[in-house]
Image (cartoon, rainbow, N blue to C red):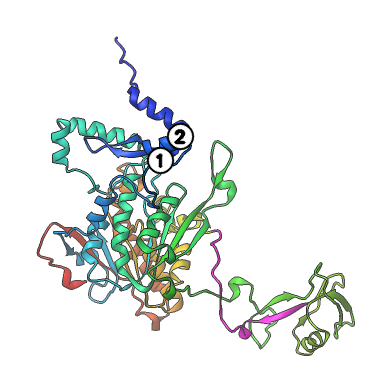
Amino acid sequence: MEKNAPQTLGLTDQNVDKIAALFPNCVTETQDETGALKKSINFDALKQALSGSVVEGGETYEFSWVGKNAAAEEAFKPIHKTLRSCPEESVDWDKTQNLYIEGDNLDVLKLLREEYRNKVKMIYIDPPYNTGNDFIYKDNFRMSEKDWTEKTGGKTEKRKRQSEKKLDSSRIHSDWLSMIYSRLLIARDFLTDDGAIFISIDDNEVDNLKKICEEVFGAANFVCTFIWNTKKAAQGMATANMVVTNHEYILVYAKEKSNFRFQGVDRDENNGFFNPDNDPRGLWKRQYLQRKGQGLPVRTITDPATGNTFSFETPYTQEKLERWIQEGRIIFPSDTSKYPARKEFLSEYAHKQQLVTSLGLFATKATTEKLYALFDGKKIFNNPKPDTLIQFLVGQTAKDALVLDFFSGSATTAHAVMQLNAQDGGKRRFIMVQLPEECDKNSEAYKAGYKTICDIGKERIRRAGALIKESVKPNESSLDTGFRVYKIIDDNTREASSDL
């Protein structure tokens, strides 16, 4: 049997790869005559690298990619679609203020833009991380299928090019950048003047995403980058050079930073305050009096109960220490080799919240186990975001905030909003948007009857809402655990717009 000849790159492609190995900053992305992305040489940059002198032309600071202008245009194109109401799939249709919308989020954002302009306090999204998999989101940033077919001679060639593009997607950023850029341009209009967007991302696109956000929201409105540990180091994914990746990022940008502030973290049992001796003055935490190696004066105090004396370096005066003893604030250890501490009462703090710091460990394992229990022991969804993480983030907004998530996935954000409202009596509302991506037919979710990601998300809200409703007191039965379902349809009647 005659073997097929091995496939090889053209000479030009080989030369481009050689230049890329020597001068990676001189390689960019362009479109060929069919609209497909390919690697190309930036000859001005190459000339600069080889000549050692400044090339002709002005310099500007900009962030660009193939398809950027088209993506910006797409964000403001009119849309000829509407939302169809689905009461039969909803919960508490007549009284709920929560929404679940099925459809491409670009279409949904366009439809909702005027209705919810300047009304959303918080946006949280967990977009695709561009890890090398093909996008499920439609691409409106290049030529139409009709034009492509005419130029390539038929659908067979088109499929071939799409397959080649998929294999190369791990090193091509333009598709992802265009996808997220157009959506963020629209999403900014939703935010209130004191609102903010929180975006989960990993190392693949965090640098590019930050540049896009600085363009959309303005560099001056960057709030912070949270770093959260997804799992313990030993459980992370090790690379070939023995580095364990066990973290992701959350970028935070405000609509107007001067108007935005976090709510802060309550000072309570969760961060060092407790009351083991039932002190009538309430919760307190230890503040150690000893300060070594600072050249401070040495003070001596005596435990009135035991007569034991303690000498230590401290910034406090003898008079202040004696007063604290009289007030019962000093905690004397039984071991004289240790040092006393002072009770610091929560009630004495001018602010009952402490500063928000970069995130710690919010492991996904616990959330996965919760979903197992919620779905009768079946593994319905892989790698959901921890509900505790989203609760923490949502908790930084006002108790009456409207929260939008247009990459809803398994509806973790909706779950977090309902749970948080049950805990603190809040009246937060949510809008979830999700593309009805089909589940793998071999997956446990599909076998259990969930044909799309939307089927999973809606069912999670139903089940989680029912459990949360059962957990609250009877006089808190007004808690909103319902949601209205809408679906995108190709129609110009706008039949459901009045229901929103």
Residue under pointer 2: 51
In the rendered image, is residue 453 in sight? yes
Q: Amino acid at mark 2?
A: Ser
The span picked out in magenta is 341-361
Q: Secondary structure at mark 2?
A: helix
Which image quadrant: the N terminus?
top left
Circle 1 residues within 10 Å: few <14, some 14–19, many ≥20 = some
In the rendered image, is residue 103 in sight? no
Q: Viewed as shown, does residue 156 lie left or right of 188? A: left
Please state the horizontal and vertical placement of residue 59, each as a whole percent of the image.
39, 49
Taking the spot 68% from the left edge, 78% from the top edge, the residue there is 276
Q: Amino acid at mark 1?
A: Val
Q: Nearer the viewer, residue 199 or 477?
A: 199
Residue furthest left as drawn: 493
Residue under pointer 1: 55
Circle 2/circle 1 CB separation < 8 Å:
yes
Taking the spot 53% from the left edge, 62% from the top edge, the residue there is 359
Residue 329 occupies which quadrant of the picture?
bottom right
Taking the spot 31% from the left edge, 63% from the top edge, the residue there is 187
Residue 37 occupies which quadrant of the picture?
top left
Q: Nearer the viewer, residue 60 or 211?
A: 60
